[in-house]
Amino acid sequence: MRSRWVSLLISGDGLAELHVHLEGTVRYETAVALASGHGLPPPPPYRYSTLDGFLEIYRRVAESMRTAADFERVIREHAEVMAAQDIRYAEISINPSLHPEHDWLEGVLSARRTLDVEIGWLIELTREGSIEANARAIDIALSLEGVVGVGLVGDESTSAAPLAPLIDRAHARGLKFMPHAGQAGSAEVVREALSIGADRLAHGVASTSDPDLLRELAERGICLCMCPSSNARIGLSPDFRKLAEAGIPLTVNSDDPAMVGTTLVSELDLAESQLGLRREDLVAAAWRHRFA
Ligand SMILES: [Zn+2]
């Protein structure tokens, strides 16, 4: 009975998604059009099977997003994708190091103000980025309307410890922190992310190799924002059941929906049918662990 009521309540609220990269939402036709508008060659087709292959596509698409109009178009198109799935709220990350000009910020502001769906932005730091580039990202995070947190991407073999003062700055101003950790990297990378103040984790699935870490994540209620199809596309198949059995709050997400070729609704279906996770738990966790 209780779960039926929970389901009814949840369906009334629609869906929420917490781990999506704006650059990964760009439709291929849009990426080609944006690239052509800037005199760039078209990005490679969205076909890849390794992380490096994916990152090359991602970099090329991001390179084609330059102006306010580019960002407005991409945001509006993803808002349509959200509305079609009844996603009422999403936390979407943007990586400023991939967009060195500032013109795009106005497009982010104007698009967000006129959408029917709600978006909270995460501004991403980069593990291998310079201190100056990461400080610029924090400045954007602290000044742009609609930002709810800071993200972290990049090669997990590069320590994030030097970024701790920037995270502290964001926390002091009320922003939250969701780093990517424990996707391709080890449980140690997850431990480091916690030590510099992670409030939630993007992926975090490598924690399955460390029983003490699983216990800590469960006790502290640190939510893992997992992306099953995105993992599968680069040959990763984490033990999602083990994370659920440890009592860790979990959500599923599309990550880079256009490039992965998935949607939040597909991820929820897959999680229920193939991973044995309960849809209502995943949806409720996404609402409960949002940063806004
Ligand atoms: Zn991600």
Image: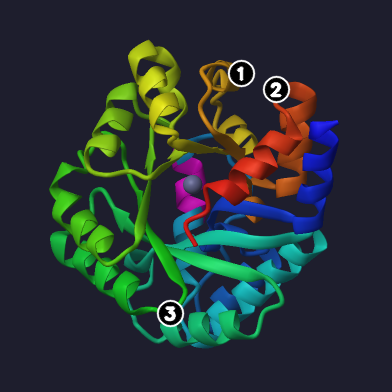
Q: CA distance from mark 2 to mark 1?
A: 6 Å
Q: Which mark is residue 277?
A: none
Q: CA distance from mark 1 to mark 3?
A: 38 Å
Q: Residue at x 14, y 60 (%)?
A: 131
Looking at the rendered structure, the secondary structure element under dot 1 is helix
Q: Image check: 292 left or right of 196?
A: right
Looking at the rendered structure, the secondary structure element under dot 2 is loop
Residue beneath label 1, please?
241
Residue 55 in magenta?
Answer: yes
Is ligand 1 closer than 8 angstroms to the Cβ of mark 3? Answer: no
User: Mark 2 is on which residue type?
Assistant: Leu
Is any atom of residue 262 visible in this view? no
> In the rendered structure, which segment of residues is drawn in magenta?
52-57
Residue beneath label 2, please?
275
The image shows residue 188, relative to residue 7, as above or below, that is above
Q: CA distance from mark 2 to mark 3?
A: 37 Å
User: Mark 1 is on which residue type?
Assistant: Arg
* 65 vs 111, nearest the viewer: 111
* 127 vs 82, nearest the viewer: 82
Q: Which residue appears farthest toward the front when viewing the image?
A: 1
Where residue 149 sits, quadrant-wise, is bottom left
